[in-house]
Image (cartoon, rainbow, N blue to C red):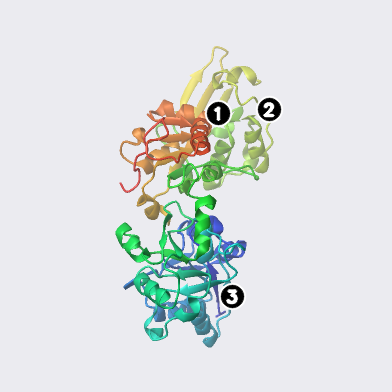
Amino acid sequence: MKTGSVLFVGAGPGDPKLLTIRGKEALERADVVIYDRLANPLLLSHHVNTDAKLIYCGKEAERHTLPQDQINLLLIEEAKKGQTVVRLKGGDPSMFGRVGEEAQMCLSHGIPFEIVPGVTSGMAAPLYAGIPLTHRDYNSSVAFVTGHLCDKNAQKEPDWAALSSVETLIIYMGVKNLPRIKERLLAHGKAKETPVALVRWGTLGEQKTLVGKLETIDQDVALAAFAAPAIIIIGEVVRLRESLNWYESRPLFGKRIAVAAKPREGRKADLAARLEALGAEVVPIPLMEKPISLSAVGTGIPADFSSYQWLVFDDERQVAFFFQELRQRRFDLRQIKSKLAARGELAAEALERSGLYPDQVLDEKLSPTTLHLELSLGKGDRILHLSAGKSVVVLHAQGTMTHSIQAGTVEWNPAHPTAKWIEKRPIDWLATDDSYALPALAAFAGADWQAKPLICASADAEGRAREIGWHVVTSFAEFGDEARELWSSGVHVSEGELSTHEPEQIGSR
């Protein structure tokens, strides 16, 4: 059997968009992903094939899912099956991440391996807190230090005498041992007034920063109940946070928004990107598109659809549902004799991408009730209108008929690998630019979904949300303008500060 390979990949500091392109490519190739606690689960949903095997081996203080020796053996076992194995590590795999030990194990068993660097939290977390690691007015040296000593090197403490002379210290895994770290630095001459910052969950929406001075920082941490995981920064550069705190000063910083967005072609900024620009932490809701099979109650594409004189597609979604259903039926497209019409250019382009060219492109603003007046019809001719909404049959005075059906739906996917992780996280708002996604958002929101605050980034979604009974609906333009106005006035958005609604805790239901 062909031997597989192991790719050690840095997952970055937390924000899934800080993954490297090389890391993304590795995840896309993976047959098996062995991931740790600090790797954002959204990476698994965005970049990993759905049939890949996912294995969690997270480590926390005093609690390891898998001991290190078992992780080493797991890498070898999976690779020997001929699999491409990605070992996904938070931050950079070489920065206190045991990649050397795991790579040596691969080497000893003849397993090919590759190491993909990542953005380390020791660099990213300070920057997201407004603290550059170097500044020519403050320092010319930086040291990266582990604050956690494992059993094997318990007698090998860092050289605190040497480190006390380094202008900036970045300490990983040091919260528990902070009193000892402080004591050793002060004992070796570090000034007691030296500024110190701790950044917890850096680059994420729950990022917290605590600033103090070396002499009392352990007391400040205890008083604030400030817990790991956190990066500790010691040095004069911490003073720059007061003026350079760009991330935490954004208007929606600390707010988590669950987004169900329409797939978008090209580079145009989507809803998630616009919300992120305002500082929100965006959680993409996993969705699945499902064609509606023919049923006894008249929903779905009828069995004799090809006998209709016209097939009219409302939008690109209905085109996609139509072809999904035909593939399930193993229907030969050459049997379609109907004329084709598309409401709007997007629906027309979707048809063309599937190899069918519309006979007529209608104005997307055209009322569906006048379709029969826009198409060439004879007495007894029938139109099959694929649109969002209820199935209905309308007979016209001219002796023609329009049969409107919905070819498919968009649903919340509770079986997705990230679904349980998302459900546990409190959500402040829901958002969408897609009217089709509203039922999925309602299913995700759970009981009393009508009362959950909703941001709509399209007139179609906004109108449909009000129509189906959503109580608290805000347009993105109104929401964004109010947030930006508060931002420019120097006011940070807090609970209830956007006047249209009071945010609720939607998750954790």
In this rendering, the label closer to the viewer, 1 or 2: 2
Work out which quarter of the rendered image holds the N terminus and state it: bottom right
Going by the numbered disc 3, the residue's amino acid type is Glu
List the residue tagged with mark 1: 384
Report if residue 355 is visible in the image. Answer: no
Residue at 49% x, 69% y: name it: 170
Going by the numbered disc 2, the residue's amino acid type is Gln
Q: Position of residue 179 (x, y in %)?
A: 34, 71
In this rendering, the label closer to the viewer, 2 or 3: 3
Q: Position of residue 446 (x, y in %)?
A: 33, 41
Residue at 66% x, 20% y: name it: 376
Looking at the rendering, which quadrant does residue 258 occupy? top left
Going by the numbered disc 1, the residue's amino acid type is Leu
Secondary element at image label 1: strand
In the figure, is residue 319 to the left or right of 147? right
Q: Nearer the viewer, residue 454 or 96?
A: 96
Q: Residues within 10 Å of mark 3 (few under 14, many from 20)?
A: few
Q: Residues within 10 Å of mark 2 (few under 14, many from 20)?
A: some
Q: Position of residue 203 (x, y in %)?
A: 49, 56
List the residue tagged with mark 3: 114
In this rendering, the label closer to the viewer, 3 or 1: 3
List the residue tagged with mark 2: 360
- Figure check: 390 above or below 32: above
How far apart are the two marked residues, 2 and 3, measured between alpha carbons? 54 Å
In the figure, is residue 58 to the left or right of 124? left
